[in-house]
């Protein structure tokens, strides 16, 4: 009997599996479920039609406005909130319009009303930029229909800055463009009455006012002891610690400082420790006055109440924010969009004591979040799937300004880690867009459905030009110091065709010739790019020796050969290379995968080709070295070449110069940012160091200069850097994706980093879900792109 | 026997404690993730980590952890992995079902098939049936599971369209759509196990079939089938059963890549993320989950010998030993 039961069991299992493999028509809706039909009808939509966007996401932990950390979390918020001022794709699809959304009208500068207000610290002579009044629309509601008022704004700001919660996004409102008056002190008010250590610079303590006490430790005029921060974040070092910069200290100074660190990470400031610190900072061009930025003085934390923070509720739907620092209208409109609201009852109900602080689990599940944007979350399975539906309580669906927008009635995002899986699902019609990898480009690179999205990052070869460090790493028969000869570096720049390089080695990048690419907008009002300015174009023409940017290739093999020979002759004459030495350049990369191998092979082949017929023919070798800390290695001169890249801050190209002129940022060992640079500014030749140029451009004389002047200086700095050839631009990164047959973006062309192609707001579909499912089935769920 | 079981459980608890202590210390020795954060958020992270005691001496942290664990069975809460602030034990409880679902189905599928084909191979030793099964064994043992996972996904899921490419969302594990979507991950997990079971059972049964008592059974008048089923089969299970228990551990810990390929919202891929993202609580809880299963399985292995083969006695005095 038992044997028959066993046989029967096995047979049932086999049959069930075989039955499970039976073919049936897979339609997109089988994986998506059905999105609820909208109750209002945007243009082109019928009441019966549903348009469900199927996409992927990379995982979220929380989408709470006060605690989100990664971009996919912010993307989730993006569907469910309404910002005060929307940056909408304009009618001509070449820029944006700033449109009040949660706000009823544009912000009003009411600085005059608060000028001289001691509570908020607004200067008496301030006339603009400190205080902004926002009138909110009166018909905005949460998804349950509760009206949104100025009280919600106040409650949200209180939570952002709560000293009891220490929320991740708190600094959005105590530093930067929307730092409220007294917000930082309020955030730290849990330490009120305690002796705390505060950065001496923030306390307004001048270095000259510090003096050594009987025990040798420095103190301020009131006798408050001073310390040097060692393993604590230092704002002057952009939040890094001095310890992380200890590589710049001599061994003796390191021993002096590290030997006196107390358990809290501070070093008593004495003649000895200050001297050791200054030995390092002076090499960065800093003065003794700058030392207060590394020093911390004891002081009693002052109690700050919410009333003293720069927020005033004028009436139920009007509020004013008073800023720590003045802001332009554009910056304010842009930055205030960081203020995403939380719903008080839900936020409070989900607060828990997590030990020393309270945290709220708001934004971690459907029932712990409330939408006030075009979509609401209807289901969420951690690390699997999120579903959105239209939020019918959203004011926009009954507002004429939104007519024809938000055709999408539902959104389904799935976490699919494997690219191949994503691709097959897309080809079956189960996803509406998919990102492309390098291996996809051959097949889909020229598809009618491919979209390229430029990114701000420009990749370049970063070269070590420090003679001593290169020399110290040479072994018998190997030369590296030829990298210190500018002709050799220039030859590298001329040796390869960037257009061919990006085709051969990257997925879909654009060749790069400058340090800043087309993503950088120098005039937010018009959307004009820095790269499009006459000064930026002239820089590239001058550097690459062409008369027009249209002629740029960066490739000149004959010139490269001449320069190789020239560099070799100089190097030989200086006794730095022998007639049999091989030039070996170590190319440090994060991982030695095929992509990097392709890159190094390409560069080696190009240089070998350029060296043909010269004394270095066959004597140049590039070696790929895996180094997961390659940035640090380059900063310390421990490698010869890496791939450098900087990006971000697309609306402020001037700020980007910090990356290449500030010692705290510069990666290329051997480059001295304090060397002189002469720039012609409106016809006047002015000379100062690279670093000073940056300071003057960003914080000093030229910070508020005319756009034309600022562009001229920026282009002059870029030219100075490029002509040093310690950074050789190669390509600008670019993302590529496929859109499904039914998807239509607001703009076919990528407009800029602010509006992209119009986003989901302007996205439309040529087929609704039912038509799409039928269409995919007709194609046997094997769509062709 | 009871004394032996108690002793093993006691030793298991001690081992668990030692491993937990080591893991607690080791994960905290990894570099501080705050160092890599820029943009002004480092301070808030520092403040949070300070409040949560991450900068206290490790021994103090461990004391607090043990206190919470013993008094409330509180393993902490998710910080960077999973759902923010969700109690870890609750989070793991939400992840385990998906992992168990595909692994239990895989076991249900692979064990009988492995045994059936193993019997066929042994009975038809050196005949074409045996050769065919041996080829199957060679292929599926030597190829890693993620290879045929991708092949299955491409051929069965994409080209033929017989099964969904990824596992269905939701928690309705007894629905047809969920079972349908789990077929490919289950098959991918099963191939290696089927081949392993076949190989082992074939070897055991082949050896058993050549024993003298089998000859005696045949001379008593039993048919070949009767002798095989009643005498050889059970004896061949003795070494197989412990290995089946080991497979329970293997499939749970080894499903990381399968979970990733088929988007199974299980515990496997969470584990790696907890290390990379320094979620101490999640890492420790998952680690201890695996360790506890491993230790429990070890005890079960040993006990199972005695149950399968009554001649084997565990932990008894010398008079009970063979």
Image (cartoon, coloured by chain):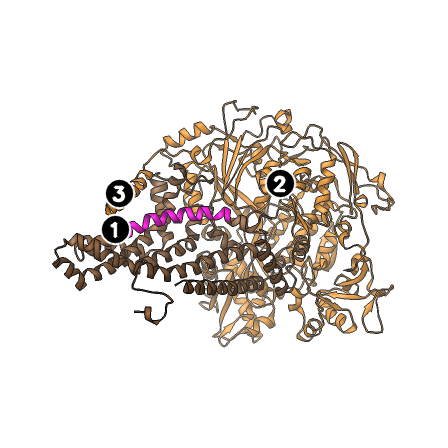
> Is residue B110 highlighted in magenta?
yes
Q: Nearer the viewer, mark 3 or mark 2?
A: 3
Chain containing the residue with disc 1: B
Do marks 3 and 1 both belong to one polypeptide chain?
no
Viewer-proximal residue, A566 or A218? A218
Chain containing the residue with disc 3: A
**A703 with respect to A114 (left or right):** left
Q: Position of residue A727 (x, y in %)?
A: 59, 59
Q: Position of residue B301 (x, y in %)?
A: 37, 60
Q: Which residue is mark 1?
A: B116
Q: Is residue A137 above or below residue A688?
A: above
**A325 with respect to A545 (left or right):** right
> CB under 8 Å between callouts 3 and 2?
no
| Badge 3 element | helix
Viewer-proximal residue, A205 or A534? A205
Q: Which chain is brown?
A: B
> Is residue A37 highlighted in magenta?
no
Q: Nearer the viewer, mark 3 or mark 1?
A: 3
Question: In the rendered image, is residue A508 in sight?
Answer: no
Q: Is residue B58 above or below residue A451?
A: below
Q: What tint does the image give chain A?
A: orange
Q: Which residue is mark 3?
A: A8
Q: CA distance from mark 2 to mark 1?
A: 63 Å
Spot the residue most to the top.
A47
| Badge 2 element | loop
Q: Quadrant of residue A691?
A: bottom right
Q: Which residue is mark 2?
A: A754
**A87 with respect to A134 (left or right):** left
């Amino acid at each position: 009997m038992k044997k028959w039961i066993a046989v029967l069991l096995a047979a049932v299992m086999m049959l069930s599996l075989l039955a499970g493999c039976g073919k049936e028509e897979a339609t997109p809706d089988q994986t998506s479920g059905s999105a609820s039909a909208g109750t209002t009808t945007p243009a082109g939509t019928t009441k019966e039609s549903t348009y469900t966007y199927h996409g992927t996401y990379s995982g979220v932990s929380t989408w709470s406005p006060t605690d989100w950390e990664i971009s996919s979390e912010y993307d989730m918020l993006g569907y469910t909130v309404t910002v005060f001022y929307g940056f909408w794709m304009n009618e001509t699809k070449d820029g944006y319009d700033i449109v009040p959304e949660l706000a009823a009208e544009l912000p009003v500068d009411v600085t005059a009303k608060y000028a001289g207000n001691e509570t908020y610290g607004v200067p008496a002579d301030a006339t603009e930029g400190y205080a902004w009044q926002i009138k909110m629309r009166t018909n905005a509601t949460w998804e349950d229909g509760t009206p949104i008022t100025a009280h919600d704004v106040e409650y949200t700001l209180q939570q952002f800055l709560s000293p009891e919660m220490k929320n991740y996004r708190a600094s959005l409102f105590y530093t930067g463009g929307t730092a409220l008056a007294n917000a930082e002190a309020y955030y730290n008010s849990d330490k009120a009455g305690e002796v705390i250590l505060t950065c001496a610079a923030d306390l307004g303590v001048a270095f000259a006012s510090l003096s050594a006490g009987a025990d040798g430790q420095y103190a301020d005029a009131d006798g408050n002891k001073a310390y040097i921060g060692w393993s604590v974040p230092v704002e002057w070092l952009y939040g890094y610690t001095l310890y992380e910069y200890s590589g710049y200290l001599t061994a003796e100074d390191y021993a002096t400082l590290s030997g006196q660190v107390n358990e809290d990470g501070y070093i008593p400031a004495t003649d000895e420790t200050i001297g050791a610190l200054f030995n390092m900072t002076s090499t960065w061009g800093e003065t003794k006055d700058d030392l207060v930025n590394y020093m911390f003085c004891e002081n009693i934390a002052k109690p700050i109440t919410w009333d003293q923070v720069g927020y005033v509720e004028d009436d139920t739907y009007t509020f004013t924010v008073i800023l720590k620092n003045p802001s332009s209208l554009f910056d304010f409109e842009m930055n205030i969009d960081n203020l995403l609201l939380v719903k008080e009852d839900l936020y409070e109900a989900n607060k828990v004591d997590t030990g020393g602080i309270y945290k709220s689990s708001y934004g971690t599940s459907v029932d712990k979040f409330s939408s006030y944007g075009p979509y609401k979350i209807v289901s969420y399975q951690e690390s699997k799937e999120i579903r959105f539906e239209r939020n019918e309580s959203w004011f926009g669906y009954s507002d004429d300004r939104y007519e024809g927008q938000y055709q999408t009635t539902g959104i389904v995002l799935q976490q699919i880690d494997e690219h191949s899986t994503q691709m097959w699902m897309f080809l079956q019609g189960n996803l509406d867009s998919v990102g492309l990898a390098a291996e996809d480009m051959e097949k889909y690179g020229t598809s009618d459905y491919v979209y390229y999205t430029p990114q701000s990052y420009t990749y370049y070869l970063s070269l070590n030009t420090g003679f001593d460090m290169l020399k110290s790493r040479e072994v018998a028969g190997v030369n590296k110091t030829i990298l210190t000869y500018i002709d050799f570096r220039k030859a590298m720049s001329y040796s390869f065709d960037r257009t061919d390089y990006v085709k051969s080695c990257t997925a879909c990048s654009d060749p790069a010739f400058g340090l800043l690419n087309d993503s950088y907008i120098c005039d937010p009002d018009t959307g004009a790019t820095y790269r499009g300015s006459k000064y930026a174009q002239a820089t590239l023409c001058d550097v690459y020796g062409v008369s027009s940017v249209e002629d740029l290739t960066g490739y000149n093999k004959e010139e490269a050969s001449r320069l190789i020979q020239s560099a070799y002759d100089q190097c030989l004459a200086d006794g730095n290379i022998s007639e049999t030495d091989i030039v070996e350049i170590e190319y440090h990369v994060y991982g030695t995968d095929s992509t990097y191998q392709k890159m190094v092979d390409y560069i080696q082949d190009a240089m070998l080709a350029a060296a043909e017929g010269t004394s270095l023919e066959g004597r140049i070798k590039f070696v790929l070295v895996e180094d997961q800390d390659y940035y640090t290695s380059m900063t310390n001169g421990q490698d010869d070449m890496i791939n450098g890249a900087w990006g971000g801050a697309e609306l402020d190209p001037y700020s980007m110069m910090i990356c290449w002129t500030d010692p705290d940022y510069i990666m290329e060992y051997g480059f001295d940012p304090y060397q002189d640079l002469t720039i012609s500014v409106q016809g006047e030749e002015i000379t100062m160091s690279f670093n000073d140029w940056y300071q003057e451009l960003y914080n000093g004389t030229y910070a508020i200069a005319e756009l034309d002047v600022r562009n001229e200086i920026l282009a002059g700095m870029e030219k100075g850097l490029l002509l040093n050839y310690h950074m050789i631009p190669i390509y600008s990164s670019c993302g590529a994706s496929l859109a499904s047959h039914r998807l239509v973006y607001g703009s076919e062309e990528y407009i800029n980093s602010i509006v992209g192609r119009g986003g989901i707001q302007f996205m439309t579909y040529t087929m609704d879900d039912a038509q799409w499912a039928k269409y995919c089935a007709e194609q046997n769920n094997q769509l062709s792109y | 026997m009871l004394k032996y079981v108690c002793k093993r459980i006691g030793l298991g608890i001690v081992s668990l404690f030692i491993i937990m202590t080591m893991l607690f210390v080791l994960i905290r020795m990894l570099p501080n993730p705050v160092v890599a954060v820029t943009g002004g958020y480092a301070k808030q992270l520092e403040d949070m980590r300070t409040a949560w005691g991450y900068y206290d001496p490790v021994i103090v942290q461990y004391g607090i952890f043990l206190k919470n664990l013993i008094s409330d069975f509180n393993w902490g809460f998710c910080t960077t992995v999973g759902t923010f602030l969700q109690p870890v034990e609750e989070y793991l409880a939400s992840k385990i079902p998906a992992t168990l679902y595909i692994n239990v189905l895989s076991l249900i599928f692979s064990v009988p098939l492995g045994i059936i084909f193993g019997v066929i191979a042994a009975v038809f030793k050196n005949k074409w049936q045996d050769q065919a099964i041996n080829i199957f064994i060679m292929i599926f043992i030597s190829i890693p599971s993620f290879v045929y996972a991708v092949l299955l996904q491409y051929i069965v899921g994409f080209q033929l369209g017989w099964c969904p490419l990824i596992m269905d969302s939701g928690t309705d594990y007894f629905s047809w759509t969920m079972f349908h979507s789990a077929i490919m991950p289950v098959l991918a997990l099963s191939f290696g196990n089927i081949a392993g079971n076949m190989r082992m059972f074939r070897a055991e049964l082949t050896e058993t079939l050549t024993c003298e008592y089998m000859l005696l059974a045949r001379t008593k008048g039993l048919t070949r089938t009767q002798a095989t089923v009643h005498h050889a089969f059970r004896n061949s299970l003795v070494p197989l059963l412990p290995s089946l228990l080991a497979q329970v551990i293997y499939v749970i810990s080894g499903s990381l890549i399968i979970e990733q390929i088929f988007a199974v919202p299980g515990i496997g891929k969470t584990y790696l993320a907890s290390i990379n993202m320094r979620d101490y609580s999640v890492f420790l809880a998952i680690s201890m989950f695996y360790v506890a299963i491993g230790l429990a399985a070890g005890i079960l292995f040993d006990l199972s010998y005695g149950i399968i083969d009554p001649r084997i006695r565990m932990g008894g005095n010398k008079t009970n030993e063979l």
